[in-house]
């Protein structure tokens, strides 16, 4: 059943915003955007709230892992849609949780014994032009150096050239120190 509002409709352009009209108590420190995320009884403190109320809808077209990562970076929360098997939901949540503050575990890694041919094959397979050289060839191995597309010229090097001949070694990398815990 439809409900008709008897008041006239308004658009934002019909309102006048007067500068300096707010009182002295209306400062950012006195404003709270705290929003409850779960149901709670009236008069009780909500057990789960957000200070920045950015939440995605529980819809397949809206809440994927990219939305989850994007909202998490801005301080929000995304709800993973449930119209998929539990295993896929868990994988989606795992991928969002593995995204740590803008750092993604590398899937383009080389070993010290790899060659230019291995670099070119990995670049073709992954599409990445910068690759980490680690002691065990994994994203969690000890970083020994980096190979970028500027480090080699395919026309000038033999495909059997080892990465140690053209990589940038760790001691020549510029990096920030680890933040204190």
Image (cartoon, rainbow, N blue to C red):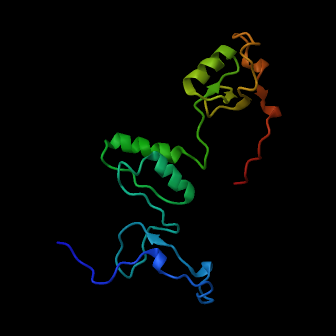
Q: Nearer the viewer, residue 60 or 173?
A: 60
The single residue placed furthest to the right in the displayed view is 172
At 47% across and 51% down in the image, what residue appears?
68
Residue 16 is left or right of residue 40, and the answer is right
Q: Position of residue 123 (x, y in %)?
A: 61, 23
Q: Position of residue 119 (x, y in %)?
A: 65, 20
Q: Position of residue 152 (x, y in %)?
A: 75, 20
At 61% across and 33% down in the image, what residue appears?
139
The single residue placed furthest to the left in the displayed view is 1
* Image height of 59 relative to 127, above or below: below
Number of numbered discs: 0
* Image height of 74 relative to 50, above or below: above
* Image height of 79 relative to 28, above or below: above
Residue 115 showing in the rendered view: no
Q: Position of residue 132 (x, y in %)?
A: 68, 30
At 46% across and 46% down in the image, what residue appears?
65
């Amino acid at each position: 059943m439809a409900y008709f509002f008897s008041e006239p409709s308004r658009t934002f352009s019909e309102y006048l915003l007067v500068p300096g009209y707010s009182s002295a108590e209306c400062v950012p420190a006195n404003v709270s955007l705290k929003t409850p995320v779960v149901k709670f009884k009236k008069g009780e403190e909500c057990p789960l709230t957000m200070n920045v109320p950015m939440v995605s809808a529980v819809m397949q077209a809206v809440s994927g892992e990219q939305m989850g990562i994007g909202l998490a970076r801005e301080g929000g929360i995304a709800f993973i849609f449930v119209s998929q098997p539990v295993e896929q939901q868990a994988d989606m949540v795992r991928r969002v949780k593995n995204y740590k503050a803008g750092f993604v575990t590398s899937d383009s890694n080389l070993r010290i014994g790899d060659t230019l041919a291995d670099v070119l094959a990995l670049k073709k397979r992954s599409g990445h032009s910068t690759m980490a050289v680690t002691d065990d060839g994994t994203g969690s191995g000890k970083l020994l150096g980096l190979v970028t597309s500027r480090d080699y010229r395919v026309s000038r090097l033999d495909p059997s050239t080892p990465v140690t001949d053209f990589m940038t070694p760790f001691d020549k990398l510029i990096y920030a120190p680890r933040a204190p815990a």
